Image (cartoon, helix red, strand yellow):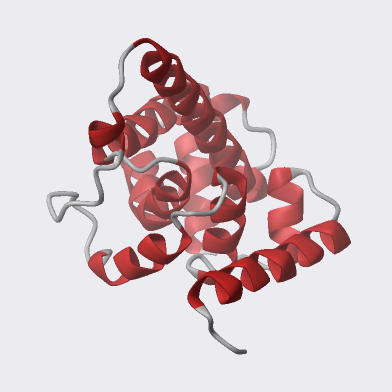
Amino acid sequence: MEILLEIKAAKKGDKQAFNNVITAYERKLYIIARSRLNNNEDIKDAIQETIMYAYINIKKLRDATKFNSWVTTILLNTCKKIYNQKEIKILSYDESEENNLHFKEDYDIENLEENQSFFDIIDFLKPEDRTIISMYYLDEYTTKEISKILKINESTLRSRISSIKEKIRQRYGKEE
């Protein structure tokens, strides 16, 4: 409930309230960006662009209770833009070594190292699948919340989660 008050204050122009909101969402933003992008610099860029866009446009947010899905959508679109820009560069210059950089401990969010093995496990998945499974397991979004944010039918999403889990099991030979 307190975060909702902070969001409402941020909508009214309170810079400290916006800072508090971003601090509260920082871990979620990182996890989602990391599920889409592998390069630590790209992850930082995506988060920074998202924060800047959110700061500039927060007054346009009609319903403060929708902040989570609003900022997540901004981040997903930013990640897509960065990913597409990388794809264009790869076609013109082989940067495969740079694009396989993994999370380094210089990122300023506490305790994310524990999630690195999770990202190592899911790296073979398509970016969309990594996002879904990260949101579901690391951020503990419900399937209803994920379906709203990603605009996927909830039953379709449950099927995709099941399919993703099966891919992981097949890849690593794990039984449920």
**Residue closest to the eye, 12 or 47:** 47
**Residue 55 x, y percent position in the rendering:** 42, 28
Between residues 149 and 24, which one lies in front from this camera angle? 149
Decide if residue 88 is on the left or right side of residue 74: left
Quarter assignment of residue 133: bottom right
Indicate left or right for 79 with 161 as reference.
Answer: left
Q: How many marks?
A: 0
Residue drawn at the location 51% of the way across and 53% of the way down: 5
Give the residue at x 37% y 44%.
Answer: 17
> Is 147 located above or below residue 45 in the figure?
below
**Residue 116 in the image, given as x and y percentages of width and height:** 31, 64
**Residue at (36% x, 62% y) in the render:** 120
* Residue most extreme to the left: 106
Q: Quadrant of the N terminus?
A: bottom right
User: Where's residue 147, x and y in %?
Assistant: 76, 54
Residue farthest toward the top in the current orientation of the protein: 92
